Image (tube, helix red, strand yellow):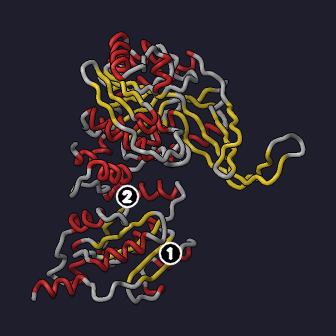
Amino acid sequence: MDLSLLKNLSAARILVVGDVMLDRYWYGDTGRISPEAPVPVVKVSKFEDKAGGAANVAKNIARLDAKVGLLGLIGEDESGQILETILKGEKISSQLVSVCDLPTISKMRVISRHQQLVRLDLEEMFTEQHSQLLLNRLELVLDEYDFIVFSDYSKGSLSLIKEMVSLAKGAGKTVLIDPKSPDLHLYEGADYITPNLHEFKLAGGQTDSEAALAASARDLISKNGIKAMLLTRSEQGMSLISADEKFDFAAQELEVSDVTGAGDTVIATLAVMLGAGMEPKDAVEIANLAAGIVVSKFGAATVSPEELSRKLGQYLHTTGEHYQTPFDDVLQHIEFAKQNGETIVFTNGCFDILHAGHVRYLAQAKARGDRLVVGLNNDESITRLKGAERPINPLDERAMVLSALSSVDWVIPFGSLDENDTPAKLIEQISPDILVKGGDYTVEQIAGAEHVLRHGGKVEVLEFLDGCSTSKVISKIKQ
């Protein structure tokens, strides 16, 4: 597997087409039974809106740094406006089409103590007339994308999917489909379909044995003009089946928290990895790992490139190869982490020759929150601060070593002349929840402290490990 292709994720250009939804969550505590009916009373304390359905597929793609657009149907209502706002925050190019006669599909869940008490669905079926609007828009935007993902939730948006697939294939696009109809002939021409076991059986698939499963899968894709099937099999993992090959991938997560949205993550990851240039088998292997990560989370969750890289490293037992987030993408990843409610910790330094004191200090910093961002002085900055003989190691190498530490989530360089060799401007961009600095500083002396405190954050000073410093290491080497 070529791990270097993980650096090409942003090269993937993917359009998601399908049934978009607004997922609404109302959280609260229950302490009594209603006097009006034998149901619990929930005192709502928190509201949360998320992109659902095909929009969740697009969100998964965006979180993996690919360029993504979303084509679907919404109503001319508040829910549609909320969904548009969410997409903008997720860096998803909205191609949503508004219809005046039907509402935006919305699902409201009432949750107490991590248990869903009730779900309320607001939806009506879209018609072929509505689907024609999507087909017309698809023709207009098709040239902007290389991969087309159809996300079918049987809500009517894809009533004309056969025509849509034909249009996409005629334009030379790679087509992936998460199917809902048992009539697979509707998906004729698709490069990949990703049914689960239940959908596979409804389409005529046989599961009595591995041989029967493979034979029936090949029969289905052959009869219906489909290139390959990625069959998701719950605790049995998944299988990639084509006319002449079958690859099986074991499930990667035994502690399942919530399978909601796992199928969205699978097809999204598959599309991104194919778009980055991976071979199909390798792309599926990573999609399987992504599914293992996402089912360990609550609700319709997503996976970051960093999480995939860590999981992949454990899976392959590799050394020396890992994914380092491109500097330009880090700020967006931090913003996504904030949207997930994660606590962001920031620290900074030269980290020219990494030693035990650094490792201990960074581990202590990470323990203050969920994610650790390290601001790293660039080479010119270190030369101005430390002298002409420094740095010993150039920026890219220092960043690679830091990124390999389990305590470090992101590394961002700083140190231009207009920044006065301090991370103050970077800290203002990130607005971390906690700012950490090592040494014998006072809070007032720490660059960026005023900004963090003014925005409700905390500033902490940690002690370095006695006897450890880069200068001492260099001196010892010279001796």
List x then y, in percent, for residue 53. Answer: 54, 34
- Residue drawn at x 25%, y 37% is 278
Residue 6: % across, % down: 28, 47
Say how many tags the image has. 2
Above or below, 118 against 205 in this view is below
Quick check: 467 above or below 135? Answer: below
In the rendered view, tell whether residue 50 sits above or below residue 362.
above
From the top left corner, tell me how far across and down residue 349 is, in percent: 32, 76
Q: Amino acid at mark 2?
A: Val
Q: Nearer the viewer, residue 377 or 202?
A: 202
- Please determine whether, in this image, residue 398 is positioned above or below residue 57: below
Residue at the outermost top position = 223
Which residue is labeled 2 in the image?
330
Q: Which residue is mark 1?
A: 451
Give the residue type that dot 1 points to. His
48 or 131: which is nearer to us?
Answer: 48
Q: Which residue corresponds to the image point at 44% horizontal and 42% vertical from the top-left?
A: 60
Residue 445, by quadrant, is bottom left
Instruction: Judge left or right: residue 465 versus residue 319.
Output: right
